Amino acid sequence: MYATARPFAIRSQIRTLVRLMAGVGGCALVSACVGNPFRDAQIDPSSPVAAEVARIVPANTTYPTFAGIPAMPKDVRPVKQYGRDAAAVEKTRAQLERQTAPETWSLSDTEAFAAKARAEAGDEPAPTASGDTADFANTQRKRATPPPPPPN
């Protein structure tokens, strides 16, 4: 019933060994990044793409540096102002939603509203029948007689 301490001691040694091997492997992988293999690379002149590579790759090109980054413009609003403007838009949205909520208006007393609108608009003029229009309508009604039924 008594277990020996030996298996637990071996496990701790294995754990230590695994950590050590992981560290050595990580160092070996990172050490490959120390040098730049492309810095001293030469183009093989007998290669079929040598002329094309020499034409495409510029030999002495200056590359931009961090010193070439332009300064921050002076006419840009401060970063905190963006947050203030967003908060103002949200406040306006909430106010508009409160003002137009379903419980803020009703459709009561519609007859009085319609009577007021009719009074403001005035009387609607009665349509007058023009002689030409009435003649055209009568001509079209006469032409609109149904065709005779097909013979059986």
Image (cartoon, rainbow, N blue to C red):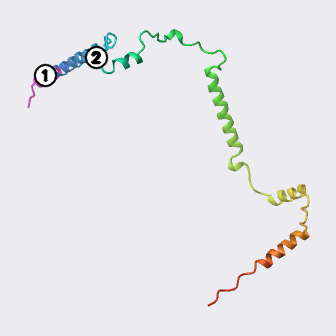
Q: Which secondary structure, mark 1? A: helix
Lateral position of residue 102 relative to residue 117, left or right: left
14 or 103, nearer to the observer: 14
The quarter holding residue 38 reads top left
Could you say where residue 69 lies in the image, as x and y percent from the top left? Answer: 54, 13
Q: Amino acid at mark 2?
A: Ser
- Residue at the spot of label 2: 46
Q: Secondary structure at mark 2?
A: loop
Identify whether 13 is placed above or below 107.
Answer: above
Q: Nearer the viewer, residue 117 or 71?
A: 71
How many discs mark residues in the rendered view? 2
* Residue on which disc 1 sits: 10
Name the residue located 78 percent from the left edge and 77 percent from the top edge. 143
Chain part drawn in magenta: 1-12
The image quarter in which residue 27 lies: top left
Disc 1 from disc 2: Cα separation? 59 Å
- Judge the density around disc 1: few (<14), some (14-19), many (≥20) Cα neighbours within 10 Å: few
Q: Alpha-carbon neighbours of circle 2 within 10 Å: few (<14), some, or many (≥20)? A: few
Q: Residue at x 87, y 56 (%)?
A: 116
Mark 1 or mark 2: name the one nearer the start of the chain. Answer: 1
Return the x and y of residue 145 as percentages of the image width and height: 75, 80
Q: Could you say where residue 103 lies in the image, as x and y percent from the top left? A: 70, 50
Given the image, on which type of amino acid does mark 1 rest? Answer: Ile
Residue 102 vs residue 116, the one in the foreground? 116
